[in-house]
Amino acid sequence: AGFGAASAPSGVVTLDASAGGAVNETGGAAVVADQLAVSAVNASSLTSSGNNVAVLAANLNGAGAAFSYTDADSFAVGTAGSLSGVSTNAGNVTLTALNAGDLTLAQSVSTAGFGAASAPSGVVTLDASAGGAVNETGGAAVVTNQLAVTAVNASSLTSNGNNVAVLAANLSGAGAAFSYTDSNSLTVGTVGSLSGVSTNAGNVTLTALGTGDITLAQSVSTAGFGATSAPSGIVSLDASAGGAVNETGGAAVVADQLAVTAVNASSLTSNGNNVAVLAANLSGAGAAFSYTDTDSFTVGTVGSLSGVSTNAGNLTLTALGTGDLTLAQSVSTAGLGATSASSGTVILDASAGGAVNETGGAAVVADQLAVTAVNASSLTSNGNNVAVLAANLSGAGAAFSYTDTDSVTVGTVGSLSGVSTNTGNVTLTALNAGDLTLAQSVSTAGFGAASAPSGVVTLDASAGGAVNETGGAAVVADQLAVTAVNASSLTSSGNNVAVLAANLSGAGAAFSYTDADSFTVGTAGSLSGVSTNTGNVTLTALNAGDLTLAQSVST
C-alpha cells in the first residue's frame, strides 16, 4: 500500500523462515497488507500496533515455538496464498485485535499442527478486549490444550470441531453474550491470568458434544469475575449429548437464570452458587441431580427448559442461608410432564432458614419426597404425586401442608422419618380416592416426641379414601381432625392428642381411634365431633386416661 500507509486494500505479504528460523518485528515496524502469511520454525512475534491486515495465516513447526500477532483493528484467521489457519507444534498462540477490532476465525487455530483434532499442549489466547468480538465462521475451530478469550462484544465459538481441555473467557461489554461448543469434555478453569467465564450481564452458553462432560473448576458468572450475585444473564450448561455437568473446588455459577442439561449424574453444590431461577433435565436412566444455592431460588423456566427433571434419578435441591426454595415449575423423577413416577427421590432442603413452597400448579412427581425447612411450607398442588412423604419444619409455629393427587404414605425418605413440626399445624390431603397411610409418625412436637402442647394435625382423605396407621406410627398433637370416606383406623398406642374430631362419609365405614391417655371429642379446626354414615365408632383411652365428649359422637 506504499510507504507509510496504514491500511492496504490488496496484496499478500509472505514471511518465510520455514527453513529453520523465526519471524519477528522490532522498533514499531509493521506489516500493512490485505493478507499475511507467516511460516517459521522458531518462536515468532509480530505485535506492532501498526500491523494491519485483513487475513492472517501462519505455521510454526518447531516444537513448542510460540506465535503472537497484533493487528491495529479487525482481522480474520483465514487463507493467505497456500497457507490456511494458524498452527503451531505445541507452541502458544496469541492473537490480538486493537481499536474495537473483531477477531474472526474463518480457518482453524491449532497448537497441534494443521488439521489436528486434538492437542495435548499449548495455549491459544484470542484477545479483542480493546472493543471487539471473537467469532468463528465456516467450521473453523480452536484445537489446543487451553483457550482464553477476551472481548467486549458478543462472541461465539460454536464449531463442533473445537477441542480444548480448559476454557477461560471474559466479555466486558454490557449484555454481550458468550457461547462456546467443544467436541468433547471441557473444563472451565484458569488460562494464564484469566480465570473462569464471565460476562457483564450477557448470557453464557457452554456445550460439550459427544460424551463430553462440562466441569467447572472456576466460576461462571454473568456479573463479572468474582461477583457473588447477578441481577441478569442466563447461564446454559449443556452436556445433553452424553455427558455430565459438575463443579469442583468451590467453583460456582452466578447468574439470574441457570439451565443444566446432561445425561449422566450431575452435581452443582458449591455454596457460592447464586441464581434466581433454575431449570434442569438429566436424561440418563437413574442419573441424579443436585444443586445448592447460597440463598433463595425458584425452580422455573429458563429459555426453552422448564422445571427440574430426571429419568428415575434422585433430585436434591438446597437453599442455604435464610433462602426459600420455590417451585414455580414442576420437579419430577419421571421426566418433564410426567404425572407419576415409579422410582426416584426428591429432597427439597431449606433447613438453613427458609421455606419450601409451590406456586402456579407446579408439582412434585417422584417415588419419595423429603422436605426440610424452618418456616411455614406448603406443597398443595393437585398434581403432586409421591408414594412416600417425610418432612420436618423446625421453626416455632411453622405449619406444613401437603396434597397428593392420590394415595400417599408418611414414611422414611433417606435419613428423614415421618412428618414433624415445632408446634406448627400439619395438613395432609389425599385426592381422587387416595388413601392416607401413616407408616411413620406425624407430630407437632418434633420427631420422637410423646406429647404435644399445641398444633393441629389434619388428615384428609375425604375425596374417596381412608386414613390408617401401620407399624406403630402415631399422631402426636394438641388436636387431630380426620376426614375420610372409607373405614379408617388410628389405633397406635402412641397416639397422643388432647382433642379429636372425625367424619367418615362412606356408608357403613367404621372409625377407630386409640389414645395413649386422656382425650376429648371436640372441635379440631372446622370439624366438630366424631360422625359416620352408619359405620361403627370405637374410641379408646389407655393408661388410666379419661374419654370426654365435648362434642357429639354419631353414627
Image (cartoon, grey):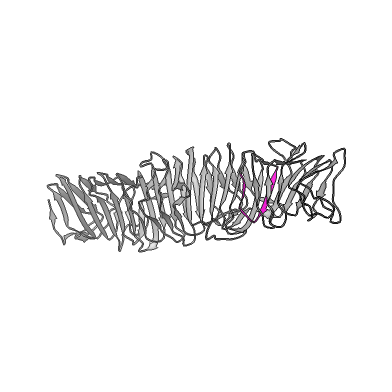
Can residue 448 be spotted in the picture? no
Residue 469 at what x, y percent from top left? 28, 47
Q: Is residue 445 above or below residue 344?
A: below
Can residue 479 be spotted in the picture? yes
> Which of the 4 quarters of the picture holds residue 172?
bottom right
Q: Main secondary structure of the magenta part?
A: strand
Residue 332 at what x, y percent from top left? 41, 44
Residue closer to the observer: 275 or 157: 157
Residue closer to the observer: 227 or 163: 163
Residue 10 at what x, y percent from top left? 77, 45
> Which of the 4 quarters of the picture holds residue 272?
bottom right
Instruction: Determine whether, in the image, residue 372 is placed left or right of residue 233.
Output: left
Q: Which residues are magenta?
A: 144-157
Instruction: Determine whether, in the image, residue 204 is placed left or right of residue 500.
Output: right
Residue closer to the observer: 268 or 45: 45
Q: Is residue 148 magenta?
A: yes
Residue lying at 68% horizontally and 56% vertically, measured from the top left: 100
Residue furthest right in the image: 20
Residue 206 at what x, y percent from top left? 58, 46
Residue closer to the observer: 74 or 224: 74
Total labels drawn: 0
Q: Is residue 456 above or below residue 246?
A: below
Q: Is residue 199 magenta?
A: no
Instruction: Determine whether, in the image, residue 101 is placed left or right of residue 525.
Output: right
